[in-house]
Amino acid sequence: MLYTIIKALHIIFMVSYFAGIFYLVRIFVYYKDTDEFAEEKKKILREQYAFMARRLWNIITVPAGIIMAVCGIIMIFMNSGLMKTPWFHLKLTFLVGLAIYHYWCWKKVLQLKELKGNTLETANIKLRQANEIATFILFLVVFTVILKNGVIEYWWQLITGFFVLVFLIMMTVKLVNKNKKK
């Protein structure tokens, strides 16, 4: 029963963490969108976005990420057999990717604070594409956990499907961004 409760908490805080990451990178996009605004409006909005990013990071994203990780580690200790399964090693590999993305987000939050309302140098399209990275990682982790050994058995079909998904999402982002400029 305790393991199931820890697992439920892990899932709840995983959802909270990803909600924070999804919205955080969206705030970076909104900040960048102010490049063409009048100076007074730009200054006000950029201060607000930088404030929102820090608050979201410090109050929701990082605490949820810590609780998610602690629950995950507890589950590994409670069920050490997980470490003997190939699918779990694949999940851990994807989590390394998530940690790298988390670090990138943290650096951007710090950068917004240090910019003091100045222009964010990252291109708008790059921020919009970066906004999808967490989606891809979420897909990879969830499919791996749900399919378990099926991920190993049907790896090439899943990789093909994943790359089709990535391509479609990236093309949609480009199309939406292109239409936005018109």
Image (spheres, rainbow, N blue to C red):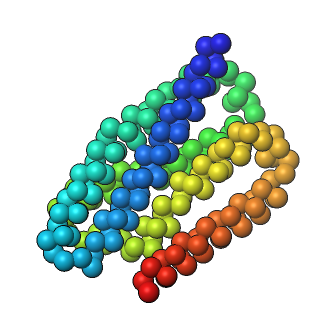
Residue 89, percent across and down? 68, 40
Q: Quadrant of residue 6?
A: top right
Regarding residue 69, the answer to whether it shows in the image is no
Is 126 drawn above or below residue 77 in the view shown? below
Furthest toward the bottom, the residue is 182
Is 180 drawn above or below residue 159 in the view shown? below
Question: Which quadrant is home to the C terminus?
Answer: bottom left
Q: Quadrant of residue 64?
A: top left
Is 131 drawn above or below residue 55 in the view shown? below
Residue shown at 17% from the left, 67% from the top: 43
Left or right placement of residue 156 versus residue 98 in this view: right
Residue shown at 76% from the left, 61% from the top: 161
Residue 1, percent across and down? 65, 13
Regarding residue 99, the answer to whether it shows in the image is yes
Viewer-nearest residue: 39 or 136 = 39
Residue shown at 48% from the left, 63% from the top: 130
Residue 155, percent across and down? 80, 53
Residue 26, percent across and down? 41, 59
Residue shown at 17% from the left, 63% from the top: 44
Viewer-nearest residue: 90 or 146 = 146
Left or right placement of residue 2 versus residue 154 in this view: left
